[in-house]
Each structure stands twice: as structure tokens, then as C-alpha cells.
Image (cartoon, rainbow, N blue to C red):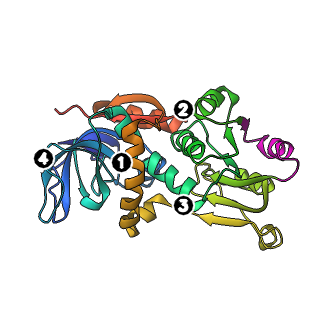
Amino acid sequence: MRGIGYDALGNLQVVSQAVPQPKANEVCIKIEMTSLNYADLKQWYAGTSSFGLDVAGTIEEVGNDVVGFERGDRVIAFPNSNGHAEYATAKQQLVYKIADSVSWEQAGASPIVSFLSYMLINDVAQLTGNHTVIIHSASGGVGSTAIQFAKRAGAKTIVGTVGSLAKADRAVNAGADYVFTYESFADEVMKLTGGKGADIVLDSIAGDVTLESMRALANFGKLIQFGNSSGKPASLSTSDVHKSCRTVVGFSFGTTRKERPSYVQQVASQVIPVLNAGHVQAHIDRIFPLSEAIEAYTYFKSRKHSGKILLKVDQA
């Protein structure tokens, strides 16, 4: 099969790979669509090859002890083999059936962003109708999806942030009440809230944005740090939290997926019906064929995109 890997000189390429065989409690999936995530860029930079965190396709083969799946089932999954390929294997706990009404494009764009957004909004933040929430990278895949889940949870006010106001429409269309730039959001939120600050901040950027987020965070508020797309650290001190009763929480979907798959399975029971009904729509920027995967990675690296970048897998 074809899949993303490295040639003899260590260059990222579409290469020939062996079709993975499912072990006990695993399935093999014939992939239709798969998405790019920041973790894929990290794999590229590190020269490692665990590409493709989520896939959409049909069950090709089931391993021993698999229950509830058969060949031809339409599914989304979090694979344990290369997901940027024609086939991938996944543990049955991390495979979920989807309705025929869900397009392959939405199926391919949705797994990471919808599961992560649901967990952040409903479980980690425990957002309610009394909360003002700041969602960074609001025009991106996770950000725009998190806005939709925050809207469903009844957030009082949703503030999105973007690198440029040229991307503001994506956040507004997703349901943001206000959109500000990374440079201005702290001051603007303090004005909006009469000096109180936001109750919740979803931060996938780190660096200076985290420091500004703390400045915009209300007493008893919660900052959820779940990414580092800026590539820069942020240093906080105990004085940032003890007197204000504020909380800083770290979250990783990757760690959760690996160490608590049963929790991910529970979340699926809430997320899949939402996806099947089309109540949440992942924004798609561009779709590349698998044969042009290197161009897709290069485009992703440029950060010119707004929304999800997908690879369409046409079987050779």
C-alpha cells in the first residue's frame, strides 16, 4: 500500500508500505479520508513516523475477539498504525460507527476536533450558561469546533481569538460573539466583562498568549492548556493562582487516548450522535489526494490555512 514515510535520504515521501494486519481486539480500516494535525508536523520535525491521528473509512478486516464490527462498516477511528496511508489498524475501543448520512469529508475532518472539543468544553471546563469563555485559534479546526460545542453548552459569551482579523469570519460563523487578535484580546475581554475577566480560557498556543490569558482570567477562573502551537513556553508563578483562586489545568487528547481509551469510548456515545445529526460541522480548508501529501504537509507548515486539511485516499 501507499503511505507517508521517509525515503533512503530521510525525506518525507509517499512510499510503499506493508498493509498492517489486525491483532486480537483490532480492526483493519480501508481509509477514505484522514486529516493533518499539529502532531503530524512534530513527527516530521523529529524524523519519526507515527503520522495520522484520525481516519475515516470502512472496516476491511477484523481481528480475533472483535465484537460489533464487520467488513464494510463505515467508521471513524484513532489508529495505532500510520493513518496517512491506504490502510490502518485500530483497537476496537477507538473505532466508532458513523451514519451513512455523514460525508467522508466531515467524517475525516471531525474525529480529533470533535472529541477533543467535547472533552474540553463539557468535562474539563464544565462550561455552563453563566460562563464567559475565550477560545484561542478560533478559526482553526479545534477552535471553530470548540466554539460550536460551547454554543451547544449554552455559554453566556464566547470570545474567539485569531492571528489576523482576516480570519474572524470563520469564528463568527462557528458561533463566536466576539473575535479579537492575540495582541488585543486581554484588554478587550476586560472591557467586555467590566474588569472581571473570563471564566474559562482554552489555550492551545502557549508562550505570550498564555501570559495574556492569565491577565484576562477572572478570579476562580480556569485556564486549560492543551497545546503549544507557538513552540514557546510560558512561565507562571504560584502568585498567579493562589490569591485569585484561579486554576491552570493541562490536558492532552493523545495521553488520554493511550491511557484511558474507555473514557474516549464514553465520550463517543455523546459525540457520534451529534456528528450523525450534523449539529456540529468541522470547517475544511483544503483536500489533497494522498499522492500530494507532501504538498499538504508543506501547506500546513505555512500556517496559511483556516480549518482542517484532509488527505483523500484514492486506492491505487
Which residue appears at 56% of the width and 39% of the height? 144
Q: Which residue is mark 2?
A: 306
Q: Which residues are magenta?
A: 179-196
**Disc 4 from disc 3: Cα separation:** 34 Å
Horizontal side, residue 187 vs residue 161: left or right: right
> Is residue 35 at all visible to an observer of this figure?
no
Is residue 186 rendered magenta in the image?
yes
The crowding category of the residue bearing disc 3, from other C-alpha atoms within 10 Å (few below 14, some 14 to 19, many at least 20), is few
Q: Amino acid at mark 4?
A: Arg
**Disc 4 from disc 2: Cα separation:** 35 Å
- Of tags 4 and 2, the one toward the viewer is 4
The image quadrant of residue 236 is bottom right
Q: Which residue is mark 3?
A: 123
Please say if the residues under marks 4 and 2 sit with CB atoms less than 8 Å apart. Answer: no
Q: Secondary structure at mark 3?
A: helix
| Location of residue 98 in the rendering, given as x and y in whole percent from the top left corner | 29, 43
Which residue appears at 45% of the width and 65% of the height? 255
**Disc 4 from disc 1: Cα separation:** 19 Å
Seen in the picture, residue 149 relative to 312 is either above or below; the reply is below
Q: Which residue is mark 4?
A: 71
Horizontal side, residue 280 vs residue 177: left or right: left
The crowding category of the residue bearing disc 1, from other C-alpha atoms within 10 Å (few below 14, some 14 to 19, many at least 20), is many
Q: Secondary structure at mark 2?
A: loop
Q: Which residue is mark 1?
A: 54
